[in-house]
Each structure stands twice: as C-alpha cells, then as structure tokens.
Image (spheres, rainbow, N blue to C red):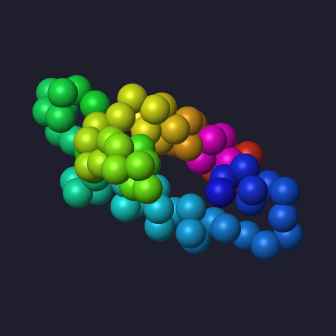
Amino acid sequence: MIELDGYTKESYALDIEKIMSSLASSQYTAKLGENKNFVLKHSVGSIPHNNEIDVPLNYADYYYLEALVRLKSLKNNIQ
C-alpha cells in the first residue's frame, strides 16, 4: 500500500497508518526474546492450503520491516 500510494492520486495514508499501528500493537508484535525471536505473531502463509497458519514466519517479519523502512522514508520525504 505504501508503494501504491506513490502511484495514485488517492491517498492511502490513513489505511497505511491503521495497518502499521495494528501490527505494532502487543497483539501482533512479540516481546523481545519471545515467539522464537520472531517479530510478528499470528502470521499466515496460506489459508486455502491450510499451511503456516497462526505461526511466526521469517518472510512476514521481512515484509513488516520493509514496510517500516518505506513508511519512515515516506514520512521523511513529506517533512
């Protein structure tokens, strides 16, 4: 959504903030040293395949961190 926001006239800023705030909450972000040292809890690989449901996933952490970097860059460019 952050990348899409840069290509459209419509702003997704409120949706982006809502999603990122939710992921940053204690409901989805593990405490340091917990969750087998993964950042996000409750990730899902594929519901249709009944695979990797409600588990920590390395690629979920990667995309979350990527989104945080992009969001920080976006905010720095606005200011």
Percent position (x, y) of residue 47? 39, 55
Residue depicted at x 79% and y 55%:
6
Which span of residues is magenta-colored? 70-74
Q: Quadrant of the N terminus?
A: bottom right
Percent position (x, y) of residue 39? 31, 36
Residue 71, relative to residue 39: is it above or below? below
Nearer to me, 69 or 1: 1
Residue 29 colored magenta? no
Residue depicted at x 35% and y 43%:
51
Residue 24, relative to residue 56: is it above or below? below
Is residue 43 visible to the viewer in this orientation of the structure? no
Q: Quadrant of residue 9?
A: bottom right
Residue depicted at x 47% and y 62%:
19
Marks counted in the figure total 0
Percent position (x, y) of residue 21? 40, 59
Relative horizontal placement of residue 67, taking residue 55 as reference (left or right): right
Residue 31, relative to residue 23: is it above or below? above
Percent position (x, y) of residue 60? 43, 39
Relative horizontal placement of residue 48, taking residue 39 as reference (left or right): right
Relative horizontal placement of residue 60, taking residue 33 as reference (left or right): right
Relative horizontal placement of residue 36, taking residue 9 as reference (left or right): left
Q: Quadrant of residue 69?
A: top right
